[in-house]
Amino acid sequence: MTKKKKTAKNPSTVARPLKNYYSNAVRSEAGPLLWISGQVAIDKAGKLVGEGDLRKQAVQVLENIRAILSESGAAMSDIVKVTVYVTDIRAFNDIADIREKYFPEDGPASVICEVSALAWPEFMIEIEAVAVVD
């Protein structure tokens, strides 16, 4: 059995998270952390995925994160914190179902914020993450 690397914390002294795919806080065991730079909707060949399509871009971003984690022997469930940057805050609801597929339980601590632009004008979403790794 794999030792659980993190524990979601949602104390009764504060409101429940606004979405099921994140937690108010996450406690992790001391150990190595993997800091994942902001990932955007570029595939491994360097090509933009989902121009003008937030949902396709969100999937590509999360798949990039999954690939980076896998290379380090970790999984999406090992992520303790994500910061999501979007060019339209409607993404908060528009991609909620996608995020729930990647974080079905004990989601990471999370923030989402609207920004005026990302590195390329075609990018609609960027996500950075921190994960506990062995």
Image (cartoon, rainbow, N blue to C red):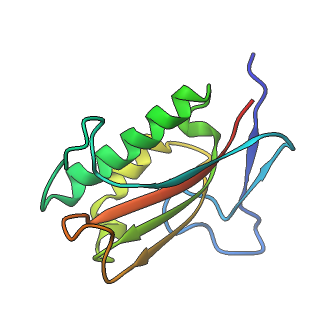
From the top left corner, tell me how far across and down residue 49 is, in percent. 19, 47
From the top left corner, tell me how far across and down residue 101 is, in percent. 40, 42
Toward the top, the furthest residue is 1
Toward the front, the furthest residue is 46
Q: Quadrant of residue 30?
A: top right
- Image position of 27 (left or right of 61): right
Q: Quadrant of residue 79?
A: top right
- Image position of 124 (left or right of 99): left
Q: Nearer the viewer, residue 112 or 48?
A: 48
Question: Residue at image x 79%, y 26%?
Answer: 3
Question: Residue at image x 62%, y 47%?
Answer: 106
From the top left corner, tell me how far across and down residue 40 is, in percent. 34, 55
From the top left corner, tell me how far across and down residue 80 is, in percent. 66, 51
Toward the right, the furthest residue is 30
Q: Nearer the viewer, residue 35 or 79?
A: 35
- Image position of 49 (left or right of 110): left
Question: Residue at image x 59%, y 38%?
Answer: 77
The C terminus is located in which quarter?
top right
Toward the left, the furthest residue is 52
Question: Residue at image x 20%, y 44%?
Answer: 47
